[in-house]
Amino acid sequence: MTNAKRTVLELLGRAGMFPGEAEELLALVEAGAIAGAHHEIGKPRDAPAGSGEAYGSGWRDGALATSDELGHAAERALERALGPALSGSSGAVARDRHPVGRVDVERAKVAVIPLYLEFSDLSELDPEVSDEVLTAVLGTMNVVGRVGYAGQLEQFTASGRERLARLYAHYGPRGHIAVHGRYSLLHSPTSIAVLERLAAAGPTLRTEWEHAELPPAWLDGLATAWEASEAPPA
Protein backbone atom coordinates (compact mmCIF):
# COMPACT_ATOMS: atom_id res chain seq x y z
CA MET A 1 0.00 0.00 0.00
CA THR A 2 2.83 2.41 0.88
CA ASN A 3 4.58 1.75 -2.42
CA ALA A 4 1.35 2.25 -4.32
CA LYS A 5 0.74 5.60 -2.63
CA ARG A 6 4.28 6.71 -3.33
CA THR A 7 3.89 5.79 -7.00
CA VAL A 8 0.62 7.69 -7.32
CA LEU A 9 2.11 10.74 -5.59
CA GLU A 10 5.05 10.71 -8.01
CA LEU A 11 2.72 10.46 -11.01
CA LEU A 12 0.55 13.31 -9.72
CA GLY A 13 3.68 15.39 -9.16
CA ARG A 14 4.79 14.82 -12.74
CA ALA A 15 1.34 15.94 -13.87
CA GLY A 16 1.88 19.27 -12.08
CA MET A 17 -0.04 18.77 -8.83
CA PHE A 18 1.57 20.24 -5.73
CA PRO A 19 2.60 17.68 -3.08
CA GLY A 20 0.13 18.95 -0.47
CA GLU A 21 -2.77 18.79 -2.91
CA ALA A 22 -1.76 15.29 -4.03
CA GLU A 23 -1.60 14.09 -0.41
CA GLU A 24 -5.04 15.58 0.27
CA LEU A 25 -6.48 13.97 -2.86
CA LEU A 26 -5.21 10.51 -1.91
CA ALA A 27 -6.48 10.91 1.65
CA LEU A 28 -9.92 11.94 0.38
CA VAL A 29 -10.00 9.00 -2.02
CA GLU A 30 -9.19 6.70 0.89
CA ALA A 31 -11.88 8.32 3.02
CA GLY A 32 -14.35 8.06 0.15
CA ALA A 33 -13.69 4.35 -0.31
CA ILE A 34 -14.24 3.68 3.39
CA ALA A 35 -17.34 5.89 3.48
CA GLY A 36 -18.72 4.02 0.46
CA ALA A 37 -18.15 0.67 2.17
CA HIS A 38 -19.81 2.04 5.30
CA HIS A 39 -22.83 3.11 3.26
CA GLU A 40 -23.13 -0.27 1.55
CA ILE A 41 -22.79 -2.38 4.68
CA GLY A 42 -25.25 -0.14 6.49
CA LYS A 43 -28.06 -1.13 4.11
CA PRO A 44 -30.49 -3.50 5.82
CA ARG A 45 -30.01 -7.11 4.74
CA ASP A 46 -31.72 -10.16 6.17
CA ALA A 47 -29.79 -13.23 7.22
CA PRO A 48 -29.84 -16.16 4.77
CA ALA A 49 -33.17 -17.93 4.61
CA GLY A 50 -33.58 -20.78 7.07
CA SER A 51 -30.79 -19.58 9.36
CA GLY A 52 -32.87 -19.55 12.52
CA GLU A 53 -33.63 -16.76 14.97
CA ALA A 54 -30.37 -16.97 16.92
CA TYR A 55 -28.28 -16.87 13.75
CA GLY A 56 -30.34 -13.96 12.41
CA SER A 57 -29.84 -12.01 15.63
CA GLY A 58 -26.10 -12.59 15.50
CA TRP A 59 -26.05 -11.61 11.83
CA ARG A 60 -27.69 -8.26 12.58
CA ASP A 61 -25.45 -7.57 15.58
CA GLY A 62 -22.33 -8.38 13.56
CA ALA A 63 -23.43 -6.18 10.65
CA LEU A 64 -24.14 -3.30 13.04
CA ALA A 65 -20.75 -3.64 14.75
CA THR A 66 -18.95 -3.76 11.40
CA SER A 67 -20.87 -0.73 10.15
CA ASP A 68 -20.01 1.23 13.30
CA GLU A 69 -16.32 0.40 12.98
CA LEU A 70 -16.26 1.40 9.31
CA GLY A 71 -17.93 4.66 10.29
CA HIS A 72 -15.16 5.36 12.79
CA ALA A 73 -12.54 4.41 10.20
CA ALA A 74 -14.07 6.86 7.74
CA GLU A 75 -13.95 9.60 10.39
CA ARG A 76 -10.27 8.89 11.06
CA ALA A 77 -9.53 8.96 7.32
CA LEU A 78 -11.23 12.34 7.04
CA GLU A 79 -9.18 13.69 9.93
CA ARG A 80 -6.02 12.57 8.13
CA ALA A 81 -7.25 14.20 4.94
CA LEU A 82 -8.09 17.52 6.60
CA GLY A 83 -5.14 17.74 8.95
CA PRO A 84 -4.62 17.70 12.71
CA ALA A 85 -6.14 21.15 13.14
CA LEU A 86 -9.55 19.59 12.52
CA SER A 87 -9.15 16.62 14.83
CA GLY A 88 -10.12 16.42 18.49
CA SER A 89 -13.35 17.27 20.23
CA SER A 90 -14.29 20.05 17.81
CA GLY A 91 -13.39 18.04 14.69
CA ALA A 92 -16.96 17.31 13.61
CA VAL A 93 -17.90 20.97 13.69
CA ALA A 94 -14.72 21.99 11.90
CA ARG A 95 -15.23 19.40 9.17
CA ASP A 96 -18.71 20.75 8.50
CA ARG A 97 -17.20 24.22 7.96
CA HIS A 98 -14.15 23.15 6.00
CA PRO A 99 -14.01 25.41 2.92
CA VAL A 100 -14.37 24.01 -0.58
CA GLY A 101 -10.90 23.54 -2.06
CA ARG A 102 -9.40 22.96 -5.46
CA VAL A 103 -9.24 19.20 -4.92
CA ASP A 104 -12.97 19.13 -4.10
CA VAL A 105 -13.77 20.99 -7.32
CA GLU A 106 -11.51 18.81 -9.48
CA ARG A 107 -13.03 15.62 -8.07
CA ALA A 108 -16.51 16.96 -8.82
CA LYS A 109 -15.47 17.72 -12.40
CA VAL A 110 -14.27 14.16 -12.87
CA ALA A 111 -17.64 12.93 -11.60
CA VAL A 112 -19.95 15.16 -13.65
CA ILE A 113 -18.34 15.05 -17.11
CA PRO A 114 -19.06 11.39 -18.00
CA LEU A 115 -22.59 11.68 -16.60
CA TYR A 116 -23.24 14.81 -18.68
CA LEU A 117 -21.93 13.15 -21.83
CA GLU A 118 -24.64 10.49 -21.49
CA PHE A 119 -27.17 13.18 -22.43
CA SER A 120 -25.36 15.93 -24.28
CA ASP A 121 -22.26 17.17 -26.06
CA LEU A 122 -19.61 19.34 -24.48
CA SER A 123 -20.09 23.02 -25.20
CA GLU A 124 -18.19 26.16 -24.39
CA LEU A 125 -18.45 27.69 -20.93
CA ASP A 126 -15.77 29.69 -19.14
CA PRO A 127 -13.74 27.21 -17.00
CA GLU A 128 -13.49 29.80 -14.23
CA VAL A 129 -17.28 30.07 -14.17
CA SER A 130 -17.54 26.28 -13.99
CA ASP A 131 -15.27 26.29 -10.93
CA GLU A 132 -17.42 28.95 -9.28
CA VAL A 133 -20.59 26.95 -9.95
CA LEU A 134 -19.13 23.74 -8.51
CA THR A 135 -17.82 25.64 -5.48
CA ALA A 136 -21.36 26.85 -4.78
CA VAL A 137 -22.72 23.32 -5.28
CA LEU A 138 -20.16 21.73 -2.96
CA GLY A 139 -20.74 24.47 -0.39
CA THR A 140 -24.15 22.95 0.31
CA MET A 141 -22.49 19.83 1.78
CA ASN A 142 -20.17 19.03 4.65
CA VAL A 143 -16.92 17.20 3.98
CA VAL A 144 -18.48 13.77 4.43
CA GLY A 145 -21.07 14.65 1.79
CA ARG A 146 -18.41 15.84 -0.64
CA VAL A 147 -16.43 12.63 -0.25
CA GLY A 148 -19.41 10.54 -1.35
CA TYR A 149 -20.81 13.00 -3.87
CA ALA A 150 -19.79 11.06 -7.00
CA GLY A 151 -21.99 8.15 -5.94
CA GLN A 152 -24.84 10.49 -5.12
CA LEU A 153 -24.62 12.02 -8.61
CA GLU A 154 -24.72 8.56 -10.18
CA GLN A 155 -27.84 7.67 -8.21
CA PHE A 156 -29.53 10.94 -9.22
CA THR A 157 -28.68 10.36 -12.89
CA ALA A 158 -29.85 6.74 -12.84
CA SER A 159 -33.16 7.55 -11.16
CA GLY A 160 -33.93 10.52 -13.47
CA ARG A 161 -32.41 9.25 -16.72
CA GLU A 162 -35.51 9.67 -18.92
CA ARG A 163 -36.29 13.10 -17.52
CA LEU A 164 -32.71 14.27 -17.96
CA ALA A 165 -32.70 13.02 -21.55
CA ARG A 166 -35.81 15.10 -22.31
CA LEU A 167 -34.32 18.15 -20.61
CA TYR A 168 -30.98 18.11 -22.48
CA ALA A 169 -32.61 17.22 -25.81
CA HIS A 170 -34.69 20.39 -25.63
CA TYR A 171 -32.52 22.87 -23.73
CA GLY A 172 -28.96 21.54 -24.11
CA PRO A 173 -26.40 21.87 -26.94
CA ARG A 174 -28.39 19.48 -29.16
CA GLY A 175 -31.53 21.57 -28.79
CA HIS A 176 -32.45 24.93 -30.29
CA ILE A 177 -31.83 27.04 -27.19
CA ALA A 178 -28.89 29.45 -27.51
CA VAL A 179 -25.90 29.03 -25.22
CA HIS A 180 -26.39 32.58 -23.92
CA GLY A 181 -29.24 33.28 -21.54
CA ARG A 182 -31.02 31.66 -18.63
CA TYR A 183 -30.32 28.11 -19.89
CA SER A 184 -26.56 28.64 -20.29
CA LEU A 185 -25.59 26.12 -17.62
CA LEU A 186 -27.24 23.30 -19.57
CA HIS A 187 -24.31 23.69 -21.96
CA SER A 188 -21.95 22.79 -19.09
CA PRO A 189 -21.32 19.49 -17.26
CA THR A 190 -21.79 21.41 -14.01
CA SER A 191 -25.53 21.46 -14.73
CA ILE A 192 -25.82 17.81 -13.61
CA ALA A 193 -24.54 18.80 -10.16
CA VAL A 194 -26.73 21.91 -10.00
CA LEU A 195 -29.84 19.92 -10.89
CA GLU A 196 -29.06 17.31 -8.22
CA ARG A 197 -28.63 20.01 -5.58
CA LEU A 198 -31.80 21.81 -6.69
CA ALA A 199 -33.69 18.58 -6.08
CA ALA A 200 -31.93 17.67 -2.83
CA ALA A 201 -31.12 21.00 -1.17
CA GLY A 202 -32.72 23.83 -3.14
CA PRO A 203 -32.85 26.53 -0.42
CA THR A 204 -29.25 25.88 0.68
CA LEU A 205 -28.07 25.99 -2.93
CA ARG A 206 -29.74 29.34 -3.45
CA THR A 207 -27.95 30.71 -0.40
CA GLU A 208 -24.57 29.51 -1.70
CA TRP A 209 -25.44 30.82 -5.18
CA GLU A 210 -26.09 34.30 -3.82
CA HIS A 211 -22.91 34.17 -1.76
CA ALA A 212 -20.92 33.31 -4.92
CA GLU A 213 -22.67 36.17 -6.77
CA LEU A 214 -23.64 33.89 -9.65
CA PRO A 215 -26.45 35.01 -12.01
CA PRO A 216 -29.82 34.17 -10.41
CA ALA A 217 -31.28 33.65 -13.90
CA TRP A 218 -29.06 30.59 -14.42
CA LEU A 219 -30.45 28.86 -11.37
CA ASP A 220 -34.01 29.90 -12.17
CA GLY A 221 -33.54 28.69 -15.75
CA LEU A 222 -32.44 25.25 -14.62
CA ALA A 223 -35.33 25.05 -12.16
CA THR A 224 -37.79 25.98 -14.93
CA ALA A 225 -36.29 23.50 -17.40
CA TRP A 226 -36.29 20.72 -14.81
CA GLU A 227 -39.94 21.29 -13.99
CA ALA A 228 -40.87 21.45 -17.69
CA SER A 229 -39.06 18.17 -18.40
CA GLU A 230 -41.30 16.16 -16.08
CA ALA A 231 -43.20 13.52 -18.03
CA PRO A 232 -46.81 14.50 -18.87
CA PRO A 233 -49.48 12.43 -17.15
CA ALA A 234 -50.50 9.32 -19.06
Image (tube, rainbow, N blue to C red):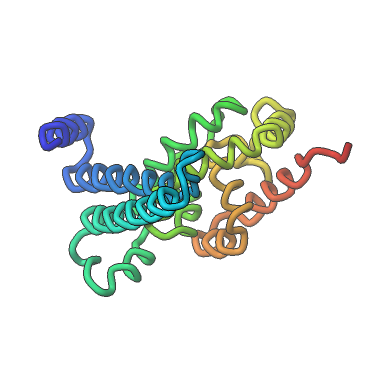
Q: Is residue 105 left or right of residue 196?
A: left
Compared across the picture, whether 109 is left or right of 22 comes to right
Asked whether 57 or 25 is in front, the reply is 57
Q: Is residue 75 visible?
A: yes
Q: State whether residue 20 is above or below residue 65.
A: above
- Image x and y of residue 80, in percent: 21, 55
Height in image: 68 above or below 229? below
- Residue nearer the viewer, 20 or 59: 59
Q: What x and y, as percent, mark residue 132? A: 46, 50
Q: Residue at x 63, y 38 (%)?
A: 159
Q: Quadrant of residue 95?
A: bottom left
The image shows a total of numbered marks equal to 0
Q: Residue at x 20, y 59 (%)?
A: 83
Quick one: which residue is furthest to the bottom in this view? 89
Quadrant where the N terminus lies?
top left
Residue 205 in percent (x, y) is at 56, 59
Residue at figure coordinates x 67%, y 25% from the top left: 174
Quadrant the C terminus occupies: top right
Question: Can residue 126 be seen in the rendering of this structure?
Answer: no
Camera-side residue of 69 and 130: 69
The residue positioned 25% from the left and 66% from the top of the image is 86
Q: Nearer the viewer, residue 210 or 194?
A: 194
Image location of residue 198, percent across then percent down: 62, 53
Q: Is residue 102 left or right of residue 209?
A: left
